Image (cartoon, grey):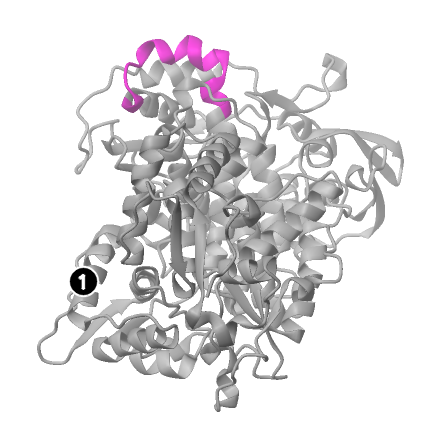
Amino acid sequence: MSQEKTFRINLPTLFERVNERRKEQRLPLVEPAVMAVRASIRFAIRRQKHLNLKDENTGEAEMDEGDADAFCQILGDLFNVDLHYDEDESKTRSALEQRAALPLDGVAGADDGATFSLPLFQFYAAINRERRAKNLRPIEPAAISVRTGIKFSIMRRRALNFRGDELLLNQADLEALDDIVAQQFDVVVPNGLLSHCRSLTSAPQPAKAGSVVADAEPEGFLARLMNRLVGKQGDHAVAKDTHHYTLDTSALLLTIVTRRAYLGHKPITPDKVRSRCGNALSAELDLEVDMNDPRIALQHEQLDAFAEVIRSEFEIMFEDMDDLLGKNKKPTE
Amino acid sequence: MREAPESKHGQTFIGGLSHVYHCNHYNAHLQMSVMLAEGAEEGFDPRHLLRDSATRLTQSLKRQGYSRQDLFDEFTWCGFGYIKEVTDNQVETPGSHYGQSTYLMGAPEKSCFFNAGFLQGAVDRVVTETACRHMKARTDVFEFGAPLPAMTDPLVNPPPFVRVPARFGFRGCEILSSPVDEDKIVATVATLPLYGKPPSEQGDGLIPAFGVVLTNHYADYYNLISYETYSRMIAAGVPADMAREAFIQCGHVCAFNTFGGIMESPEFHALVVPMCKSPEDWVHGMVAVINALGWGAWRVEKIAPGKELVIRIYNSYEGIGYRRLYPQATEKQLSFLAVGAVRGLAHLFWKIDIRERPGLDQDFYFKVFNSERGYWNVEQTHSIAAGDDFDRIVTWK
């Protein structure tokens, strides 16, 4: 059985890394002290133990593997970055000593240079769509991710990160995933999973060949969906800074209520939906959201956070995002 | 049957082997989890592990004097179905838990591995499944081949049983009393006819109960297939938390189906519910039932309604089983079933409310019970496998 590992975490380096990732995503930087406080609170709640993030002398914290994993995940959750070690391992390694000892140190996309992004909700939906077509029961995403994750680790000798919104893959990974889907879930996705991917090679490429995936700027799935709906796929990389997306507030509220009812969740009154939605969006998006306005305008970089807020606040599982979006979802200049 | 079940240390023994009740959903999911390890190690085939683990246990019983017929009788009594001899070299299982009641999510294949392994030990020959209901066959057919050499007994270490403390009489227990009469519940559950009947008694060797199909399975079979698979996954580089999660999910599925089915059953409502006023009482009631399943002696250490649930398990079948198979572990998170089951127990009361009898089906599991929202955290803090006196599972929101 595996040995317990202890990790010495260089906090300034790790916080710097968080800010680098936020900068890459054009998100505002976060004061390291704020990061430390918020992360320690969340850590205490999740792990039921106190974490000293302020060692005056060294700026380092020591923790076991479970805590280190949880800590990285918490930073990812809180600050909308992905610190999983299968991406950009060299930088994470410098902050998390001994992380390099883990056997799964994948450099996705490094071996053939062709890299793709597969949105997880499309991955789950594609499998279950095909299962329904064969009169098979759908499988919950949690089971799909664990089963796929284990098979992929064994076949490709590296781990996939199912904690984000998308999987970053190369051609060989995609072929392995197609095999796994057929073997584990008894379906074949028409034209393969590649047909659900976005190529990352059309985006500006970083100079460092070995970190194509880590440094490529992944687009949010909602952004991609919107672009697809308005026929702008591929263009948004250039034009996104000037785009605003508008959502019809009434349609959004109605969709939340009906989707929850469809899923069997306890009913929430429209007023409560309106208030919870407004509060959550305001808190998460640093945006003054008034749900009494007929429309909400969002910038491109807020779209993923928006989708996540709706998903976590109202337990809506997305298979088809169309019904979440209002009629006026066209980006406007 | 050759030997009557004997309860001691919180476990149930038949022929010296520990037996535990588990449902068809758990058996299906556990088998699928083991199958995930295909390719983890050169020459390793999880199908052989699933088959040969059964063989090693039946061979162990034969060494104790079990005859072939004794084994066939136990196969039926334990709810695995019944075996019909077709020729000297062929049998079929017209009643078959693994053939009829389990399921696959992946591509169909012949997958009554346990049955094949059980038969191998019974007849001392290589057994191959040649037809299977999972492949749309009418029944499951097994053919006997070459003589099979004896396999090693997997249970190499003595079981480190400890004295089970009184229900609320252990240091750290935050509960003083409960209106739920555990002794009465355990005694009553023991009288339920939870065994498979042979065709001569108008049975098919299956145990349908509480909306699921039960087996009174060999605990060491579960332990062998789980830990052998887990260690190979880790060696192959699968992150430990991911590998654990595959097995913990099985426990979560089990809690939903078996615990949920029990708590929705008329028997539970007739016997236990009259003793209960609050969800905490229901927890005590369900734990009392669990103490009749052979899983070890479950003790409720703490209940903070809607916030935290702490369960200790003395002589857990996973912890004791691990120590019988292997040297003391260096990691604690090894009671996979218990971890998933305790989290599932909390979900049954505080994620959904089982008291309202919401109706449990796969759709409900998919969309509500297992949805991310309101998912409880869970951790195993003490582990018999790692040398502690008990397993301790903490789940919190």
Question: At 59% from the left edge and 80% from the top edge, which residue is drawn?
Answer: A201
Percent x, y of residue A139: 60, 44
Percent x, y of residue A124: 59, 52
A247 lies left or right of B90: left
Q: Is residue B291 above or below residue A93?
A: above
The answer for which chain carries disc 1 is: A
B142 lies left or right of B3: right
> Is disc 1 surrounded by few (<14), some (14 to 19) or many (20+) residues within 10 Å?
some
Q: Is residue B381 above or below residue B314?
A: below
Query: Which of the 4 image quadrants contains residue A182?
Result: bottom right
Q: Is residue A113 above or below residue A288?
A: below
Q: Which residue is mark 1?
A: A51
Residue B175 visible in the displayed image: yes
SS at mark 1?
loop
Percent x, y of residue A306: 39, 54
Q: Residue furthest bottom?
A: A207
Q: Locate the N terminus of chain A and report the quarter of the image it occupies.
A: bottom left
Q: Is residue A257 above or below residue A226?
A: above
Q: Nearer the viewer, residue B226 or B123?
A: B226
Q: Magenta stretch mostly in which secondary structure?
A: helix
Question: At 83% from the left edge and 33% from the top edge, which residue is drawn?
Answer: B139
B375 lies left or right of A156: left
Residue B251: in magenta span:
no
Residue B266: in magenta span:
yes
Percent x, y of residue B276: 31, 14
Q: Nearer the viewer, residue B26 or A156?
A: A156
Amino acid carrying label 1: it is Leu
Q: Residue furthest right?
A: B87
Give the magenta-colored segment's residue range: B261-280
